[in-house]
Amino acid sequence: MKNFTSRFLFTIILFSLFTQSCHNKEAIIQNLSHRWAIEKGFRNEKETDSLSGLYFQFSKTGEVTTNLNGQDERLTYKLNGEDIIEIIGSELIFLNIIELSETKLILQTDLQGYNFKFEMGKEK
């Protein structure tokens, strides 16, 4: 009986953690699902104007439209864990979510040997 109780409690704890994780992902996707425009861009920790005009438009259905590669592209994305966005296109891009709030999104990634940080604001 003691062994059964231990297994039962362990199962309840795992289920609770899984449910919490799913709820957090849904909340993140809900908050992410907007059009975000660059406010400040950094390449190798130095502010740069070369990212001017950059945007991401995330949908709740897993689509993202962005001009990250210099032209508008409609791609797919998925959330890995609670802090990594995986964009699937001709090449795989991983964006680390540094901050996500109602009005602000900060992303970090490494592209072509450079470290980039995007400070984005939600467009209305």
Image (cartoon, rainbow, N blue to C red):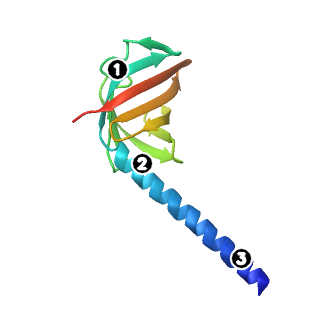
Q: Is residue 107 left or right of residue 35?
A: right
What's the CA distance linking mark 3 and mark 2?
A: 32 Å
Q: Earlier in the sequence, mark 3 or mark 2?
A: 3
Q: Where residue 84 sits in the image (x, y, percent)?
A: 51, 40
Question: Which residue does the numbered mark 2 point to in the structure image?
Answer: 28
**In the displayed structure, would residue 103 be above or below residue 28?**
above
Three-letter code, disc 2 = Ile
**In the displayed structure, would residue 122 be above or below residue 42?**
below
Label 1 Cα crowd, 10 Å radius (few <14 / some 14-19 / many 20+): few
Query: Which mark identifies residue 7?
Result: 3
Q: Residue at x 49, y 32 (%)?
A: 93
Q: Tag 3's secondary structure?
A: helix
Q: Where residue 75 sits in the image (x, y, percent)?
A: 37, 38
Q: Where residue 79 sits in the image (x, y, percent)?
A: 47, 46
Question: Which residue does the numbered mark 1 point to in the structure image?
Answer: 70
Query: Looking at the image, can residue 9 be seen?
Result: yes
Query: Which mark identifies residue 5?
Result: none
Label 2 Cα crowd, 10 Å radius (few <14 / some 14-19 / many 20+): some
Q: Earlier in the sequence, mark 3 or mark 1?
A: 3
Q: Tag 2's secondary structure?
A: helix
Q: Residue at x 35, y 50 (%)?
A: 30
Q: Locate residue 74: give its quadrant.
A: top left
Q: Residue at x 29, y 41 (%)?
A: 34
Tell which tag, 2 or 1, sits nearer the viewer: 2
